[in-house]
Image: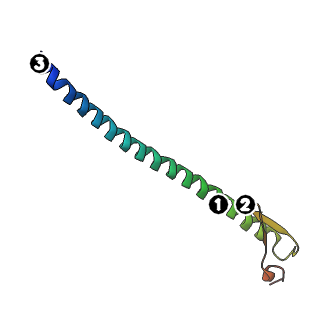
Amino acid sequence: MTTIQSTTPWVLIAIAVIALVLAILIKKIVGKIIVLVLAAVLIFVGWQQRQHVIDFANGVKDDACGESVTFLGVDVALPDDWCRPS
């Protein structure tokens, strides 16, 4: 009985330390996964908007000088040489 009484606190402390270390590791891993997913979403949205601006510019080249397009809600003006015929 005395062996159980003297060993149990150390086993419980070891379990608590292991649980704490695992909690820290899982938190770091999950945090990194969340950051990677957010970065991928931002890259996708930026690339999609970039392609929208390029498609618009190619569609109005030599035809419309006063046209504008938005990139993430910001108006983007076309360069002057896009308004002059080649």
Q: Which residue is mark 1?
A: 46
Instruction: In the rendered structure, find residue 2 and report the number of the disc placed on it.
Output: 3
Indicate which label's residue lies in the foreground, 2 or 3: 3
Residue sitting at x 14%, y 24%? 6
Residue sitting at x 29%, y 33%? 16
Q: Quadrant of residue 48?
A: bottom right
Residue sitting at x 81%, y 74%? 61
Q: Nearer the viewer, residue 86 or 4?
A: 4
Q: Earlier in the sequence, mark 3 or mark 1?
A: 3
Residue sitting at x 55%, y 55%? 39
Q: Tell me if label 2 and label 1 are in contact, CB under 8 Å.
A: yes
What is the quadrant of the C terminus in the image?
A: bottom right
Q: Nearer the viewer, residue 35 or 58?
A: 35
**Callout 2: helix, strand or loop?**
loop
What is the quadrant of the N terminus in the image?
A: top left
In this rendering, is residue 40 above or below 20?
below
User: Does 41 sit left or right of 27 as displayed?
Assistant: right
**Real-space Cα separation, disc 3 to disc 1, in angstroms:** 67 Å
Q: Which residue is mark 2?
A: 72
Q: Amino acid at mark 3?
A: Thr
User: Does 11 sit left or right of 42 as displayed?
Assistant: left
